[in-house]
Amino acid sequence: MNVLVIGRGGREHSLIQKIHESPQVEKVFAAPGNGGMEALAERVALNETDSEALVQFAKDNDVGLTIVGPENPLTAGIVDVFQNAGLAVFGPNQAAAQIEGSKHFAKALMEKYDIPTAAYRVFTDPDTAKAYVKGQGAPIVIKADGLAAGKGVVVAETVEEAEQAVEAMLIDHKYGEASKEIVIEEFLQGEEFSLMAFVNGEEVYPMLPSQDHKRAFDGDHGPNTGGMGAYAPVPFLSGQYIDTAVSAILKPAAKAMAAEGTPFTGILYAGLIQTQDGPKVIEFNARFGDPEVQVVLPLLRNDLIQVISDVLEGRDPQLQWKQGYCGGVVVASEGYPGSYEKGKLLPGLKMEEDVTIVHAGTQKQGDSFVSDGGRVLLVHAVADTLDEAMNTVYQNLEVFQDSSDFFYRTDIAGQVLRSALVHKNK
């Protein structure tokens, strides 16, 4: 079949790389795609949210399956438009995508169905919100209700910082419509991890757990980003603990969505935290995590197209996973997640076996690539141990060390590796 992947970032490139392995696929289209995808997919000059034009393209080009990557078209209802046109599409409809599109919706759902998460309150008035912050103290978490490209969350260490976040969102409208309402949550202490699952209604098929690194700089310092690197699986999580997360969170969430008349089909992403009381939800997303998908899919043995077909048709995809680990590190434009310049020439990367480049914000310029976004690319490696995977990635990133145009974190998976070393030495 012909497959259309909607999106332009690292998530979509990673999907295309996996789809390209499938013997069921004749041709892959990327709308709009990026420069790094051109070796595997034909780019289509259509915006992700131009639903009607994308539907017409799918009809004209005999597209047998469309996979929607980013959250914006999902929350805008692109799946509904494809379904109404009688086209096969993978992703939640607009009503179900609210679980990511509105923090308020997600928190209310969890509260109603006893899904473990942080205590919260919702505010539209800045003075009331600031009074609540003073009453609760810090640390405390301030979240824009709507979509803010992964940047609408402030973990405030002080009351003053929390008040500034409230003002930025409710008074200065930093995230526009996304922050006309905010959610203020208690701060949860523990290790965060991500757990994605293929879902159709109440059927849930979990993937390997992964751990993302959101802060821009080493040591988990700096502002939150869309993600600076990730690895999978997560060695400090036992199989029993993951089973608990699936049975206490993912399955109840899918069941709750169905009970509310908004059944979910697609990828349900749970951003979780390991607490003394068991796993709790930090956030839900309605699509593959980025960069988590870049380190999870390389470990999937199955044909991704067959998995998606099985899920859509109500069959168990019988997920199988490779032994070992995958680790990935993001190279970002200097200044990200703030302002940055585009069009910076990328140095050549010579990839070894089991090392892959995933393009996120790049464009082709002759035989070279230039930057075209904040997160530019991710390099990932698969190895028997996490230590080997990360060492291989960092060896391949040495060409960026002396660049003033790009930066990357040098400690992805560092904390868990240090913990493992300490444990081994004991």
Image (spheres, rainbow, N blue to C red):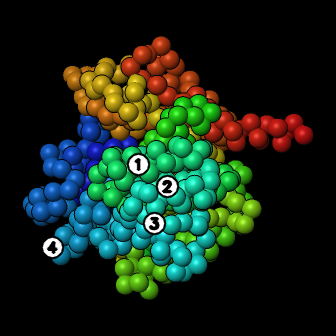
Q: Are marks 3 and 2 in contact (CB under 8 Å)?
A: no
Q: Which amino acid does label 4 sit on?
A: Ala
Please, what secondary structure does the residue beneath circle 3 have? strand
In three-dimensional space, the C-alpha distance between marks 4 and 3, rounded to whole angstroms, equals 37 Å
According to the image, label 2 marks what residue?
130
In whole angstroms, how far apart are the C-alphas of marks 1 and 3? 15 Å
Badge 2 vs badge 1, beta-carbon distance below 8 Å? yes
Q: Which of 269 and 64 is in front in this view?
A: 269
Residue located beneath label 4 in the image: 85
**Label 3 Cα crowd, 10 Å radius (few <14 / some 14-19 / many 20+):** some
Badge nearest the viewer, 1 or 3: 1
At label 1, which amino acid type do we have?
Glu
Counting residues from the start of the chain, the first of labels 1 and 3 encountered is: 3
Position of the N terminus, as image quadrant, is bottom left
Identity, as a three-letter code, of the amino acid under mark 3: Val
The numbered mark at residue 167 is 1
Give the CA distance from mark 2 to mark 1: 9 Å
Q: Distance between the residues labelled 3 and 2?
A: 12 Å
Q: Name the residue under label 3.
A: 122
| Mark 1 vs mark 4, CA separation in Å | 43 Å
Considering only order in the chain, which callout, 4 or 1, is on the residue closer to the N terminus? 4
Element assignment for label 2: helix
Answer yes or no: do the residues labelled 4 and 3 have beta carbons within 8 Å? no
Q: In which quarter of the image is residue 170?
A: bottom left
Outermost residue to the right: 426
176 to the left or right of 310: left
